[in-house]
């Protein structure tokens, strides 16, 4: 019984893990590429942000309630959502003039 | 230059406000300024180390190490503040009467002053690490580096000045009410930090959000404004908090208040009893 339950949880955990769709974003020359990310509304999604600049950047968004530092030449994951349909701006705090982007949930 | 000034100012502001209140709250205690200074130095050193190992920290907990680290530091500070407040609830009256007599300060061994060092050190560490990373980015950036460094220095000075201003304002309050005022300030400060810790735990997916944007007062004071920053630090203001943030805030607030109330009930005049025992012998 216990084994079966354990297996069920493992399968559930795995499927939950697999269900979170991932979206790739690159930071290059203090810009987000793409600057517009379209994600499904109503479900958790994972942004995989690869910082190709040698300098650190802080992914920040008041609308998405997230702030995370990404070291130079490193990749970070940011879980967001579930989001209502709409647009959610974000920016790179360390280079706010150029590093701007928006998540569009639909 | 302006952008670097604002970024550094924001980071320094939080630590400066905390240190300003702590300095005022510990008025009358021996060696408090050297303790605070040691805390700042250790915190700054720690900030450099954390910044150096930022990517190592980040890789912990399946990429959620940064969130876990920030939440842990914040919650440790909350515990330190709670400890300090409960101690003050017990000894505040004694402290106030001693601070009133010129030159007399509370004898050593009163409050473990290491709590003070740790409190200040951790406040500096968390904000400082971000400043160090930012400055490193500027230094590696090239051309406009010197202007940016100037801006950062100005930001640092401005932040520290605000801390001093708060301290200067607080110590004008008569000693007896100062402890009440500073305790009240520290209680909401601690609750606010607990709320902020919850925000990091939600971001790292360690706790459920229990609903985002419980309310939205961005039109009044937005999170990104300087006022939002100041109130965010001082009372834990968030223009649109998640449910779990509010839960952490309220639980921390109630626990600390209960602890202070208990300390007051249980040991109303511990030191007086000791003094009278000593006198009787």
Image (cartoon, coloured by chain):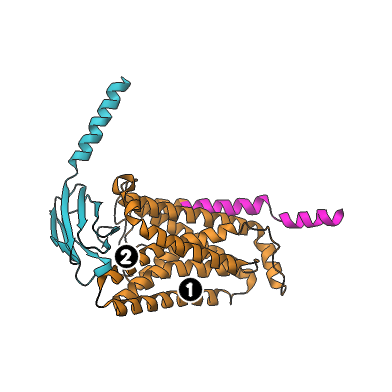
Chain colours: A cyan, B orange
Q: Which region is colored magenta?
A: B252-281
Q: Position of residue B15 (x, y in %)?
A: 45, 66
Query: Is B137 covered by the magenta stretch?
Result: no
Whichever of callouts 2 and 1 sits on the residue coming sooner in the sequence is: 1
Query: Is B267 covered by the magenta stretch?
Result: yes
User: In the rendering, which numbered label is found on residue B217?
Assistant: 2
Above or below: residue A73 compared with residue B135: above
**Secondary structure state at the residue bearing disc 2:** loop
Confirm or deny contact between disc 2 and disc 1 (CB under 8 A): no
Residues B58 and B178: in front is B58
Q: Position of residue B215 (x, y in %)?
A: 31, 59
Residues A71 and A66: in front is A71
Q: Main secondary structure of the magenta part?
A: helix
Q: Residue furthest top?
A: A1
Seen at 12% across and 60% down, the residue is A34
Q: Residues within 10 Å of mark 1 (few under 14, many from 20)?
A: many
Q: Quadrant of residue A60?
A: bottom left
Q: Could you tell me which chain the residue with mark 2 belongs to?
A: B
User: In the rendering, which numbered label is found on residue B163?
Assistant: 1
Q: Position of residue B280 (x, y in %)?
A: 86, 54
Q: Is residue B27 left or right of residue B2?
A: right
């Amino acid at each position: 019984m216990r084994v079966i339950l354990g297996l069920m949880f493992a399968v559930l955990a795995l499927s939950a893990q697999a269900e979170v769709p991932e979206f790739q974003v690159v930071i290059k020359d203090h810009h987000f590429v793409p600057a517009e990310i379209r994600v499904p509304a109503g479900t958790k999604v994972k942004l995989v942000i690869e910082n190709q600049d040698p300098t650190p950047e802080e992914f920040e968004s008041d609308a998405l309630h997230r702030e995370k530092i990404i070291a130079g030449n490193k990749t970070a994951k940011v879980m967001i959502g579930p989001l209502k349909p709409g647009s959610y701006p974000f920016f790179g705090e360390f280079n706010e003039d150029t590093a701007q982007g928006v998540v569009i949930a639909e | 230059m302006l952008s670097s000034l604002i970024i550094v100012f924001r980071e320094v502001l939080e630590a400066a406000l905390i240190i300003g209140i702590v300095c005022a709250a510990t008025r009358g205690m021996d060696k408090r300024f050297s303790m605070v200074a040691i805390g700042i130095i250790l915190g700054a050193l720690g900030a450099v180390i954390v910044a150096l190992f930022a990517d190592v920290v980040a890789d912990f907990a399946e990429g959620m190490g940064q969130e876990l680290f920030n939440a842990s530091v914040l919650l440790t500070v909350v515990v330190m503040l709670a400890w300090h407040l409960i101690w003050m609830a017990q000894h505040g009256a004694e402290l106030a009467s001693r601070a009133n007599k010129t030159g007399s300060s509370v004898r050593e061994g009163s409050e473990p002053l290491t709590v003070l060092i740790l409190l200040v050190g951790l406040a500096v560490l968390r904000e400082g690490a971000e400043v160090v990373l930012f400055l490193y980015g500027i230094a590696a950036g090239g051309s406009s580096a010197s202007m940016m460094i100037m801006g950062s220095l100005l930001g640092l000075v401005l932040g520290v000045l605000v801390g001093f201003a708060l301290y200067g304002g607080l110590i004008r309050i008569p000693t007896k009410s100062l402890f009440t005022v500073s305790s009240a300030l520290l209680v909401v400060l601690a609750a606010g930090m607990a709320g902020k810790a919850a925000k990091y735990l939600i971001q790292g997916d360690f706790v459920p959000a229990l609903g985002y944007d419980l309310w939205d007062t961005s039109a009044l004071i937005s999170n990104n404004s300087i006022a939002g920053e100041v109130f965010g630090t001082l009372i834990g203001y968030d223009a649109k908090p998640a449910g779990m943030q509010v839960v952490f805030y309220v639980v921390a607030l109630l626990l600390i208040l209960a602890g202070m109330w208990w300390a007051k009930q249980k040991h109303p005049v511990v030191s007086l009893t000791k003094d009278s025992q000593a006198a009787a012998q």
